Amino acid sequence: MPFIKPYTYVNGNVLTNINQQLNEEALKVYVNQEIITADLTANSLSGDNLAAYRFISPVYNIDFTTKQVQAKNKLRNAIDYNYFSSTTKGGNMTSATVEDFQHLPDTAVEVIIDPQAPAGFAEVLWTCYAKAYAFDALSVAAGAGAGLWDNTFLLQIENVNGSESRYAGTIQYVFGGDGSSLGTVDPDAGGNEARHRSIMFQRKLQLTAGRWKLCLVVNPKVERANINSQGSFVETFYI
């Protein structure tokens, strides 16, 4: 809705203080999305005990006393892919036992749990969305060959001390190539229906005091695949 002044300024007319005040009051209501005093219950909001937040501009994080919000979003850049490949596993590209979990760019978020947290830990809610695509295998002797190979995506949590954990409850797949299912999971579809996948996660965790990194990882079984991470969002709640 456009802003409409209650009083229109006219050359030659004397501007009264009342008309000027009407315009200023109307502008205030407009800027505040037409929220007026009558819309707010008396004493429903008090800022007396709200601590000021800390905005960390390089990483677009906002810290509060009782909550942290951290995110990486690329919604204005729909095409921004990162590639992954199982060729790093050499002759074990499609092995069900040889794992090579690779970190996926733009999905990692660092979380710092305050050592003074009242309960000694914090509740963390992590949400991530990415779009994965797997290419057909190349026709070379060293390649994996045609097949709907299963590429495993998982949430991984790393502590500053070097320990890491992957959560089976977050497992998702993108399947690559053509032919029949040659992995441990049957995609029940071939072609583009199998190799185009939206990878979406939401996980609630309890993390103790310290520095943690949450990220998406993949154990690939295709020669070439790419992923487009559009958002990774973490909310930290102190109990």
Image (spheres, rainbow, N blue to C red):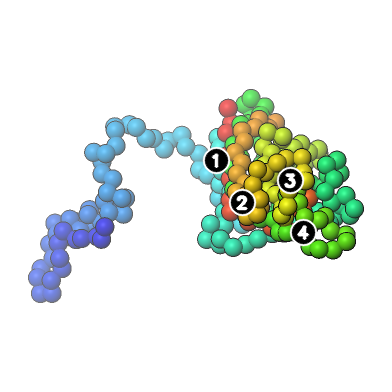
Q: Which residue is mark 3?
A: 181
Q: Is residue 145 visible?
A: yes
Label 2 or label 4, whichever comes before in sequence order = 4
Q: Secondary structure at mark 4?
A: loop
Q: Which residue is mark 1?
A: 64
How far is mark 2 from mark 4, CA to CA? 16 Å
Residue name at image x 37 percent, y 35 percent = 45
Please name whichever residue, 180 or 176, is drawn nearer the observer in this view of the structure. 180
Mark 3 is on which residue type? Ser
Label 2 or label 3, whichever comes before in sequence order = 3
- From the viewer's perspective, tell me whether residue 20 is left or right of residue 214: left
How far is mark 2 from mark 3, CA to CA? 13 Å
Mark 2 is on which residue type? Glu
Label 4 near label 2: C-beta < 8 Å?
no
Q: Which residue is mark 2?
A: 193
* Mark 3 or 1: the one toward you: 3
* Mark 2 or 1: the one toward you: 2
Q: Which residue is mark 4?
A: 137
Residue name at image x 57 percent, y 33 percent = 237
Q: Secondary structure at mark 2?
A: helix
Q: Residues within 10 Å of mark 3 (few under 14, many from 20)?
A: many
Mark 4 is on which residue type? Ala
Which quadrant of the rendered structure holds the N terminus? bottom left
Q: Is residue 56 visible?
A: no
Which mark, residue 223? Answer: none
> How far across and down, in percent of the image, does residue 22 sit?
17, 55
Residue name at image x 67 percent, y 37 percent = 170
- From the viewer's perspective, tell me whether residue 46 is left or right of residue 217: left
Label 1 near label 3: C-beta < 8 Å?
no
